[in-house]
Image (cartoon, grey):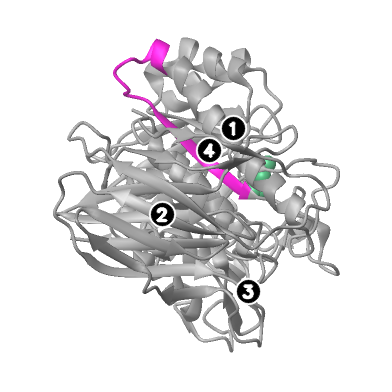
């Protein structure tokens, strides 16, 4: 269901435009419906790959480290992530997954073989973070594990035994797990069978992969009542043929089909994370809004094969991807994160909310020190990114029912890209508490937003704002935070209308009851 509509008045965005400091007005009309979908909390999923300093240094430092840790996991990162209520964590890749041999990552750490991480900078991987370390981390964080199995360079037997090692109560794999210190099986719900199988995961054609998928998943058994939710490797961005073939040839064997899309305009020249101008900013938002068409187009194919909506569309990689920070390993994908990244996160999550009937999971790339991260670390220091704060602000939307709406606002045209609405909005309800999140994308204009609350008798309980002095602002090591969540006082209800006086370039979330 997608009732959100945007009335468009076009505003040109030309190079070198100078912006007048005026204010816009926008209106939102809530249209609550008992038939609206629930926003699966898994839409707020994360992704951790053996890539750069995501795992090593980002999540895991080992018990012997001088960096404060809890059983080897960074305590600062663990505590920060707990605030996000991370519902699901995808691991060990990404491209790494299709070169990962899980048996190298179990048993005494000093006996584990080393390997070269050929995908990501040729770094030597010592396998000290493996299956036990991942599942223990998920338990500490209170998150659902999502394994990405090796199809590209692995074997059917290897994947089958991995599931058995994790979930069986008895038998040789269970004995091996017990020998490695874990008596009870873990629960494993989400199992990805390959990653980007059209690319780094084996360069398969859709037709060939569909058959390979069918074979691999056959031997991933359900032990002791463990229920697997099997996810087939899905399309790269607009590759509709991939979705068509997978749905046609293998749908009866999977519960979810993935989709990967990064907000990148030009892969040969991705641009700086921090040094960009207003035009670059609006172009990025236009690129990120393409997600809406992608979800609609892939969903339309899924609807044809699966009108009941049994199969989930799992956007298990998304986010911004900039040139790496100067002086860092190009293969480690370490990038800073500004107010622009928070805007991309807000608009993208709003799209997932709109399509919650089909989009059951999404995993931003990645959780720490890689691409659009939640946290950045440097030795013992940790920085919370603007994207982290956006995810924190949006926690109330997890598992809440979408409240459909109509939005009337101006839009800015962006050459060759989606036009960018000045106001973007989403609303959800859980246990009688409504959360309305509003995004004013304009760099120069405030926005006076009127939200018609229908017949709902609601009062403002509180509001938060995420904004910055400059869209290029980011949080850096050893510096006071420039982009952080603050209490917001500019929201009030009068005669069934919520008015929110938004500053330029801001995201406001209002809680009402
Ligand atoms: O997230 C970084 C990489 O992007 C992943 O390893 C891969 O799946 C995708 O191409």
* Label pair 4/2, CB-CB below 8 angstroms: no
Nearest to viewer (mark 4 / mark 2): 2
Q: Is 167 on the left or on the right of 257, as rendered?
A: left
Disc nearer the start of the sequence (1/3): 1
Q: Is residue 172 visible?
A: no
Rendering coords of residue 489 (x, y %)? 36, 74
Mark 1 to mark 3 CA distance (whole Å) = 47 Å
Rendering coords of residue 78 (x, y %)? 45, 73
Disc nearer the start of the sequence (1/4): 1
Mark 4 to mark 2 CA distance (whole Å) = 55 Å
Badge number at residue 469: 3
In the rendered image, which quarter contains the C terminus? bottom left
Which residue sits at x=74%, y=60%?
A: 273
Badge number at residue 158: 4
Mark 1 to mark 4 CA distance (whole Å) = 9 Å
Badge number at residue 151: 1
- For label 3, the SS is loop
Mark 1 to mark 2 CA distance (whole Å) = 50 Å
Choose between 137 and 115: the one closer to the eye: 137
How many residues crowd mark 4 within 10 Å: few (<14), some (14–19), many (20+)? Answer: some
Nearest to viewer (mark 1 / mark 2): 2
Disc nearer the start of the sequence (1/2): 1
Disc nearer the start of the sequence (4/3): 4
Nearest to viewer (mark 4 / mark 3): 3
How many residues crowd mark 2 within 10 Å: few (<14), some (14–19), many (20+)? Answer: many
Nearest to viewer (mark 1 / mark 4): 1
Magenta-drawn segment:
303-319
Residue receiving disc 2: 449
Q: Is 226 on the left or on the right of 191, as rendered?
A: left
Rendering coords of residue 473 (x, y %)? 67, 71
């Amino acid at each position: 269901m997608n009732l959100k509509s945007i009335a468009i008045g076009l505003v040109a965005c030309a190079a070198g435009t100078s912006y007048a400091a005026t204010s816009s007005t926008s209106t939102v009309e809530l249209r609550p419906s008992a038939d609206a979908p629930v926003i699966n909390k898994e839409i707020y999923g994360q992704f951790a790959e053996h890539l750069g300093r995501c795992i090593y240094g980002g999540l895991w430092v080992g018990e012997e480290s001088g960096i404060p840790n809890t059983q080897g996991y960074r305590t600062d990162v663990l505590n920060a992530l707990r605030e996000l209520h991370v519902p699901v964590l995808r691991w060990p890749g990404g491209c790494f997954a299709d070169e990962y041999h899980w048996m190298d990552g179990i048993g005494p750490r000093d006996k584990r073989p080393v390997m070269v991480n050929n995908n990501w900078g040729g770094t030597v991987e010592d396998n000290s973070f493996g299956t036990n370390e991942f599942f223990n981390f998920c338990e500490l964080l209170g998150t659902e594990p999502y394994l990405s199995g090796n199809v590209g360079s692995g074997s059917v037997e290897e994947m089958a035994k991995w599931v058995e090692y994790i979930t069986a109560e008895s038998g040789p794999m269970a004995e091996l797990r017990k020998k490695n210190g874990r008596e009870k099986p873990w629960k494993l719900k989400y199992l990805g069978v390959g990653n980007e199988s059209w690319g780094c995961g084996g360069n398969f054609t859709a037709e060939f992969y569909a058959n390979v998928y069918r074979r691999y998943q056959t031997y991933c058994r359900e032990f002791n009542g463990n229920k697997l939710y099997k996810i087939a490797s899905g399309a790269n961005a607009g590759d509709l043929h991939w979705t068509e073939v997978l749905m046609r040839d293998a749908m009866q064997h999977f519960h979810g089909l993935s989709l990967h899309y990064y907000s990148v305009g030009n892969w040969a020249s991705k641009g700086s994370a921090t040094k960009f101008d207003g035009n670059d900013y609006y172009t990025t938002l236009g690129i990120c809004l393409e997600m809406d068409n992608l979800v609609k187009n892939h969903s339309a194919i899924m609807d044809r094969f699966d009108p009941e909506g049994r199969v989930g569309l799992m956007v298990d990689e998304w986010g911004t991807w900039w040139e790496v920070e100067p002086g860092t390993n190009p293969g480690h994908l370490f990038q800073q994160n500004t107010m622009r990244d928070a805007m991309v996160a807000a608009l993208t999550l709003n799209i997932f909310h709109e399509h919650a009937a089909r989009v059951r999971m999404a995993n931003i790339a990645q959780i720490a020190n890689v691409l659009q991260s939640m946290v950045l670390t440097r030795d013992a220091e940790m920085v919370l990114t603007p994207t982290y704060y956006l995810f924190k602000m949006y926690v109330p939307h997890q598992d809440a029912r979408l409240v459909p709406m109509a939005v009337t606002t101006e839009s800015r045209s962006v050459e060759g890209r989606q036009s960018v609405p000045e106001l973007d909005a989403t609303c959800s309800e859980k246990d009688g508490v409504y959360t309305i999140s509003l995004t004013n994308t304009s760099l120069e204009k405030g926005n006076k937003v009127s939200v018609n609350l229908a017949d709902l008798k609601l009062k403002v309980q509180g509001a938060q704002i995420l904004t910055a002095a400059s869209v290029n602002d980011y949080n850096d090591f050893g510096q006071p935070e420039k982009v952080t969540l603050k209490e917001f006082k500019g929201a009030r209800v009068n005669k069934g209308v919520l008015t929110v006086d938004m500053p330029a370039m801001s995201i406001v979330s209002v809680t009402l009851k």
